[in-house]
Image (spheres, grey):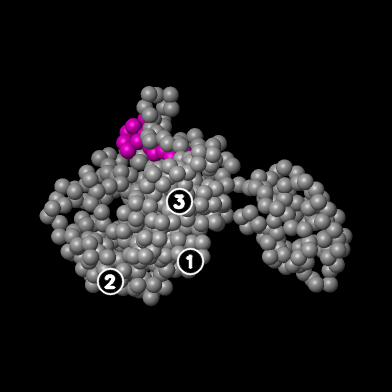
Amino acid sequence: MNELIFVNLPLFRLGHLRCLCQSRFLLWRRLLPCKLQLNPLLKFFAELFSKKRPYLPLKNTFFPQSFPIAHERKMCYHNINFRKGMVIFMYGEMQKKLGIYIHIPFCRTKCAYCDFYSFIPKSEGIYERYTEALIKHMEAYREAAQDYVPDSVYIGGGTPTALPAEYLLKIIRSVKRNFRLSKNTEFTVEVNPGTCDYKTFVRLRRAGVNRISMGLQSAVPEELKALTRSHSRDDFEECFKAARAAKIRNISVDLMFGIPKQTVNSLLSSIDYLTRLHPDHISLYDLKIEEGTPYSRIAHTLLLPDEDTEFDMYHNAIELLKRRGYNQYEISNFARPGRMSYHNLKYWNCEEYLGFGPGAYSYFNRNRFSFVRNIEAYIKGVEDPQSRIKITEGLEEISGKAQLGEYIMLRLRLNEGISVNEIARRYGVDFVALYGKKAERYIQYGYMKRSGDRFFLTTQGMFISNYILSDLLSFEDLGALSPANNF
């Protein structure tokens, strides 16, 4: 806290002034009862705003338009107390938001298409060693993150619930101990069907987990077999209902399209089945054959849908999900109202996040880096920071042209796209001057639209977004930026 400001308001009873502090705004909701005199309050704010102090803008106030409104500063009132007729304002620097990702690389079976760092443990002894290493690593970052308030935590894998529950709960407790989570933190744990029962869901909820991400991939037995998934549709439904019974109010489910032998109708049947269970969020991913996976070695034998069929799958899936109440907000993500994933949005909005575990990525203090994809090297490097084992890989400062390019690339994944005014405010550049000609070409062919100051991809554009973004964000265009621009 930087300062205390006291003002005596003898005409006001305690508790009559109600304030809501949200993000960077102090939003005055109501002042009751109406008989109270406003003059002392107006006089106080007039005096406050006339002094050169850090203060907060008021939004949607009941004050007259002539009343002076503060300019925005990066400061925020942290607390407002009412005591003996005194209103006490305490303020300090606004705390930054942060996402936290924790990677659990263990699986009970390894799917043939999976490119994430994961494996089937040969010994259960690795569970405790890895848990302790994760905890120590988080403790090492506690001071660096002390000015942040994490509002999303995501424990992914691998299969986090392949880890014995006592170790998973220990990791959760460590997150809460080392980071000052916000009151409304979205706390997600990934679950594969057949790896978590009702009792474990209850323990997770009581520990602070309020969101589950579950992998169905397909409701068609032949497609699950083609993906080498170990669960059945019945396993998934049992797991889903157990989570609901345990009072998990926010459940996300993953589906895939482009699966060997899959058809448009079989995909729609999976969506129909899933939406009847009413999950809160659905992710729909296009199967990619990644180099180094078992699938890549037999790719020539896989009966994959052709590109036109895949587009039909994608288009029809979007339409069916929309009819069932799931609005698309990103290329692969759909949600019921109010259920968009905070954690996913951190990536697309270029916000900061810290990752822990082998293969986990971070974007922190304008630096992007990852940790080595080797669990033994990771554990040993964390256990002995003075050793020669380097666990950090690919350290890169993201600034200037790269920062602008990433922002455009990631924001165009979202349905709302990019704002020309926002880019000008953030980076001091004119998007239309840099990319207007190329964007106009994609608008002409129906891959992109413009509405007001916003550019966004259509369904057709989202399907080929990788091509559009690589063409749009050419180095030649980025090189046109003036070196005087400081991002």
Tell me the residue that label 2 is attached to. Answer: 268
Q: Quadrant of the N terminus?
A: top right
| Dot 3 and dot 1 residues touching (CB under 8 Å) | no
Circle 2 or circle 1, nearest the eye: 1
- Depth check: 279 or 369 in front? 369
- Depth check: 482 or 175 in front? 482
Q: In the rendered structure, find residue 250 and report the number of the disc placed on it.
A: none
Quote the CA–CA distance across marks 3 and 2. Answer: 40 Å
The residues colored magenta run 363-380
Tell me the residue that label 3 is attached to. Answer: 434
Tell me the residue that label 1 is attached to. Answer: 451
The answer to whether 456 is drawn above or below residue 98 in the figure is below
Say which amino acid is labelled 1.
Ser
Q: Residue at x 61, y 55 (%)?
A: 23
Mark 2 closeness class: few <14, some 14–19, many ≥20 residues within 10 Å? many
- Depth check: 322 or 12 in front? 322
Residue 190 lies in what quarter of the image?
Answer: bottom left
Q: Residue at x 29, y 59 (%)?
A: 286
Instruction: From the top left corner, tell me how far across and down residue 54 is, in percent.
Output: 72, 47
